[in-house]
C-alpha cells in the first residue's frame, strides 16, 4: 500500500513538472562585435506556451553578465534601460529585436565573430533554464535571413 501511494505521488509530481511547457524560441541571433567592444546584443522571438511565463534573466560564458534591456525614447534621444523581467503572455510572441527589448551582453570576454554560435541560458520563472544556441551574424545584420527572403 505504501509503495502504491509513493508511486502515485511520484507520478503526480512528474505530471506537474511536465505541465509547464517552455516557451518556443525562434530566430535567435547575436550581432557580431569587434574584439575591443565591451558589449553586444542578442535577439530572439519568444512564443508563449499554454500558460504565461516571465523571462527573469540570462547568462553566457562569453560575457560577465547578461541583462534584459528595453529601448525608450526620452527627450528625443533613444536610451537603453535594464528590466527586471519580461512578461511572456500565453499564446503570444514577444520579439526581442534591434530598437526594442533585447539581451545586453555586458563585459564581453572577446569579440563575437560571424559564423560562430554562442550559447545563452535563458531563465524563465516557470519553465526554468533553457539553453539557446545564438548564431553570430554580420554586424550590419538587422534580422536573420531565411531561405526565400529578399
Image: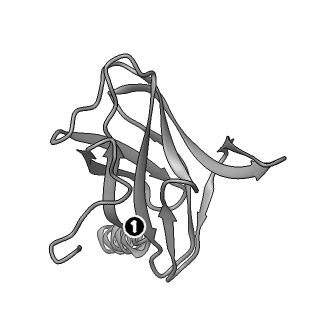
Q: Nearer the viewer, residue 24 or 148?
A: 148
The residue identified by callout 1 is 22
Considering the numbered disc 1 on the image, is that residue within a helix, a strand or a loop?
loop
- Residue 15: image location, x then y, percent: 37, 75
Colouring scheme, one of rainbow, by chain, secondary structure, one colour: one colour
Q: Residue at x 20, y 39 (%)?
A: 114
What residue is at 38 percent from the left and 55 percent from the top? 142
Q: Relative to residue 25, is residue 1 depicted above or below?
A: below
Q: Nearer the viewer, residue 3 or 87?
A: 87
Horizontal and vertical percent position of residue 143: 35, 59
Q: Residue at (30%, 24%) from the top-left corner?
A: 111
Q: Is residue 17 above or below residue 142?
A: below
* Left or right of 4, for residue 148: left
- Name the residue nearer the viewer: 125 or 14: 125
Residue 60 sits above or below residue 53 on the image: above
| Residue 95 to residue 113: above or below | below
In the image, taking residue 32 as reference, residue 100 lies left or right, namely right
Residue 36 position in % (x across, y down): 37, 16
Please rate how many residues cluster around mark 1, counting C-alpha atoms within 10 Å: few if below 14, some from 14 to 19, many from 20: many
Specify the quadrant of the image occupied by residue 113.
top left
Residue 62 placed where, x, y %? 33, 27
Res 68 quadrant in image:
top right
Quarter of the image where the C terminus is located: bottom left
Amino acid at each position: 500500500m505504501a509503495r502504491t501511494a509513493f508511486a502515485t505521488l511520484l507520478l503526480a509530481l512528474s505530471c506537474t513538472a511536465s505541465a509547464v511547457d517552455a516557451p518556443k524560441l525562434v530566430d535567435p541571433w547575436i550581432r557580431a562585435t569587434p574584439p575591443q567592444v565591451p558589449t553586444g546584443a542578442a535577439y530572439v522571438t519568444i512564443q508563449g506556451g499554454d500558460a504565461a511565463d516571465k523571462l527573469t534573466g540570462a547568462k553566457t560564458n562569453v560575457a560577465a553578465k547578461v541583462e534584459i534591456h528595453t529601448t525608450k525614447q526620452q527627450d528625443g534621444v533613444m536610451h537603453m534601460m535594464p528590466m527586471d523581467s519580461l512578461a511572456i503572455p500565453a499564446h503570444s510572441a514577444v520579439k526581442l529585436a534591434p530598437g526594442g527589448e533585447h539581451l545586453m551582453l555586458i563585459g564581453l570576454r572577446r569579440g563575437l565573430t560571424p559564423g560562430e554560435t554562442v550559447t545563452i541560458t535563458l531563465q524563465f520563472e516557470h519553465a526554468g533554464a533553457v539553453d539557446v544556441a545564438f548564431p553570430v551574424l554580420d554586424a550590419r545584420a538587422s534580422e536573420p535571413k531565411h531561405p526565400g527572403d529578399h
